[in-house]
Structures are given as structure tokens and as C-alpha cells.
Amino acid sequence: MAEYETIKEKTFDYGNNFIEVSRKKVTGEQGETEFINFSKGFYNDDQEKTYKSGFGFAADNEDAVKFMKETLDEI
């Protein structure tokens, strides 16, 4: 079974919702991989994060990292 570890995380709150950007490490039978993850969600009645959706990509995928940085600067 894979194990996930959050290395670093930043959260932007807006109202009862949030956007989270994190760097995570997954360790499993295939070895160890770091990835960058974008998630969105809301805070439940106990003020705990409830995740609705997200996407991620390998942190060493330089083309994906470059694309995200450039696109965010452009729009």
C-alpha cells in the first residue's frame, strides 16, 4: 500500500472554501516519487478541510512546472 507524506503546503482561503497547493511524496512498491498537487474544497461544520477535486503531476516534470508558472503569470 502506498504511503503519502506532505512535504510543504500552502492554502488560500476564500469564504468557506480553499485552494491548496502542496508538494507530496508517495512511497510504495514502485519506489518513491515526489509530486505537486493542486486541490480545492471547503471547510465542514467542524472547520476541517473537505476536498472536492484536485490534480497533480510529478515534481521532476520540468515541462509541466514551467507550463504552470508561465500560464499563471500570463493570465
Image: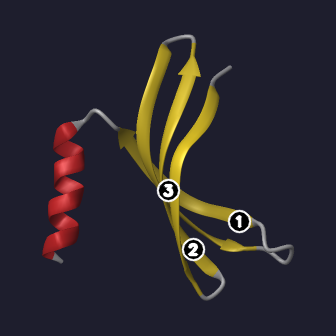
Query: Mark 3: which amino acid?
Result: Gly
Rendered residue at 19%/39% (across/down): 62
Query: Residue drawn at (24%, 48%), measured in percent from left and top?
Result: 65
The local crowd at label 2, few if under 14, some if 14 to 19, many if 20 or more residues have their Cα within 10 Å, is some
Which kind of residue does numbered mark 2 sit on? Phe
The image quarter containing residue 45 is bottom right
Q: Is residue 18 above or below residue 36?
A: below
Do callouts 1 and 3 mark residues in contact (Cβ within 8 Å)? no
Residue behind mark 3: 54
- Image coords of residue 54 (percent x, y): 50, 56
Residue 28 percent coordinates (x, y): 58, 17
Q: Residue furthest front?
A: 8
Q: Residues within 10 Å of mark 3 (few under 14, many from 20)?
A: few
Q: Which residue is mark 2?
A: 18
Classify 59 as above or below 27.
below
Query: Residue shown at 17%/65% (left/top)?
Result: 71
Left/right placement of residue 44 relative to residue 58 reads right
Q: For residue 29, what is the image quadrant?
A: top right
Q: Which is nearer the N-term, disc 2 or disc 1? A: 2
